[in-house]
Each structure stands twice: as structure tokens, then as C-alpha cells.
Amino acid sequence: MMAGDVVGIWEVALSDGVYRIEFEHGTATGKRVVWINGQEVLRRDWMFKLVGKETFTVGGMETKATVNIEAISGFTYEYTLEIDGKSLQKFIDNRSKVTKTWVLQVDGVDCRIVLEKDTMDVWFNGQKMETEGEFVDDGTETHFTVADHECCIKALSSGKKRAGIVHYLMVDGEAVAGWTD
């Protein structure tokens, strides 16, 4: 798959999955290659300008990504990744505010459930789920089904102004641990 010219590897978590982005830069040949989850998505051979940018999309939602190539000194280069026009770290920090992710097992299978707090969209292992929302006495509930299991994400007030709303995942009426931001 890849030669010895891989100079950057990044993990990017989006609602529809976690993507491994690898960037190959042949400073002698000018080659630039982008791999996502082991699949080549962009190749440029014989680029005479060794610095610059390579832009491509990631995931089913075609999120814009850019690898920036900057000369540090002589033939030393720095490679940074931007997602949606933000540095990777700023993108990750922002995602942790607008999404809630749970990693769990359902019927012995590893699962990843993502709630997009701003739209209340729910993703299960990369697929956007059909949901039904309802207002209840103590907040809201978003219902969906996964492999014959009734799931519900409860949004409740934390009672603390700084903490805001807290989201809990329930599967068949049982609270699920395993959430990550």
C-alpha cells in the first residue's frame, strides 16, 4: 500500500465514523498521496513545488480536509491537517462540544453511537438513524431502534448553569456507560 514516504498520520472522528488519514510526500519526486482508511483518495506525481496544500473530502458527508505542507528549514517540512477549515485540534475541541459519542457492545458487536447536539441527529456505526423525539417532564427523549433493541437518548438539565444539559443513552431501559466526548 504505502512506501517509506508517509510523513503524517491523523485520526479524525466524524459522525459517520473514525477515519485514519495518511499523507505520503516524496520530497525527491514531488509525489503527494492521501490515503483514508487504507484507500488512496488523491495522488499527484511530479509536483515541482514541494510546499503548498492538498485538499480532499473525508466521510460520507464529504467533510473538507486539507494537508498543509510548509518548509521549516532547508529540506525539513511541517505537515498539518485542517478539517472544515480549522486546525485538527480546534476541530476536535469543537466536536466535543457539539457531539456526544458512546462506544458500546450490542449483541456482542462493537458499536459507536453519535448524537449531534445541535441537530439531534443520531448516527449508529456510520449510518444516520431514523429517530422520534418527544418532550417529557424532565427534558427530552430521542428514540431509535438498533438490532431489535429500543434505544433512547435522554437530554436532562444538570441543574448547574456551567454544566448545562446532560445526555444519557439507554438501551432496553438500561443506562449505558462508555460515553466519550
Image (spheres, rainbow, N blue to C red):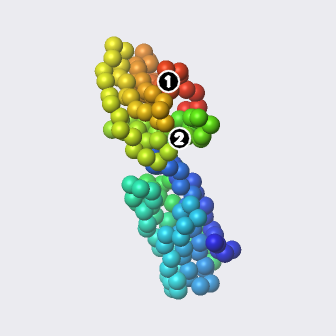
The image's mark for residue 172 is 1
Image location (x, y in percent) of residue 79: 56, 65
Identify the residue shown where x is 41% and y is 20%. 156
Whether residues under marks 2 and 1 lie with C-beta atoms below 8 angstroms apart, the answer is no
* Of the image marks 2 and 1, the number of the one nearer the N terminus: 2
What is the residue that sits farthest to the front in this orientation? 148
Place residue 55 in its image quadrant.
bottom left
Picture residue at 51% right of the left edge, 76% below the top: 43
Q: Amino acid at mark 1?
A: Asp
Residue extending farthest right: 4
On the rendered structure, is 67 left or right of 98? right
Nearer the observer: mark 2 or 1; the answer is 1
Residue type at mark 2?
Arg
Residue 48: x %, y % from top left? 51, 85
Residue at 43%, 37% (x, y): give it. 115
Q: Secondary structure at mark 1?
A: loop
* Percent of width and height locating residue 72: 59, 70
Q: Which mark is residue 112?
A: 2
Badge 2 crowding class, 10 Å Cα cut-off, few under 14, some 14 to 19, many 20 or more, is: many
